[in-house]
Amino acid sequence: MSAYFEENKGLCVWFTGLPCAGKTTISKRLYEVLVRENFKVRLFDGDEVRKTISKDLGFSREDRRENVLRVAKIAKDLVDQGYIVICALVSPYRKDREEVRKMFEEGEFMEVFVDTSIEVCEKRDTRGLYKKARLGLIKNFTGIDDPYEVPDKPDVHLKTEKESIEECVDRVLRRIRQK
């Protein structure tokens, strides 16, 4: 993998999928592996981003778009400095993800679709967000009353119902090496 980064090129690895699909778990494990291999790495997790750089935003379509673009702009700056930037955001709208991809040079962006059924996501939901959304206590919740638009051609398509965390991380690492 180091040959790709010898020229100090960076890479944005953008995880997308339903809430509780496994984006955070896989991205954190990927981060740990890359740090152990001495790469310059940054991780942006959707929940953490919402508490910091996007704490002023809600969950309307416009606010979700702004959230995604804020993270993408920061990620692009870091990629230009030679970092591997891991972004784990629901980023539910295809058009917004396509706009993010266009912000990066060829070979600097990798979309990873964390594909999990809504039933499994609900079982994994330790905070009870899906239940609250189904009861109408949370509005604009992705997968319940707001759509998730599946990527047309993700660079990596993970199926966390069938693949372990380690298998998912290995698949992403293989794709990084191919770039």
Image (tube, rainbow, N blue to C red):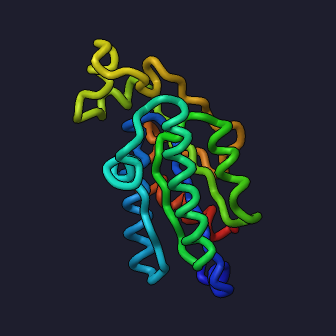
Farthest top residue in view: 135
Which image quarter is the C terminus in?
A: bottom right
Q: Would residue 49 be found to the left or right of residue 171 on screen?
A: left
Q: Would residue 133 be found to the left or right of residue 2 on screen?
A: left
Numbered-mark total: 0
Residue occupying the point 23% across, 34% down: 127
Farthest left residue in view: 127
Which image quarter is the N terminus in?
A: bottom right
In the image, residue 83 above or below residue 46 = below
In the image, residue 155 above or below residue 61 = below
Residue occupying the point 42% across, 66% down: 31
**Looking at the image, which is closer to me, 48 or 131?**
48
**Looking at the image, which is closer to me, 64 or 151?**
64
Farthest bottom residue in view: 6
In the image, residue 20 above or below residue 107 = above
**Looking at the image, which is closer to me, 171 or 77?**
77
* Residue 32 position in % (x across, y down): 37, 69
Res 125 quadrant in image: top left
- Residue 164 can be seen, yes or no: no
Residue occupying the point 37% across, 31% down: 121
* Residue 100 position in % (x across, y down): 65, 51
**Looking at the image, which is closer to me, 68 or 29?**
68
* Residue 77 position in % (x across, y down): 58, 69
Farthest right residue in view: 106
- Residue 136 can be seen, yes or no: yes
Residue occupying the point 50% across, 38% down: 64
Res 151 quadrant in image: top right
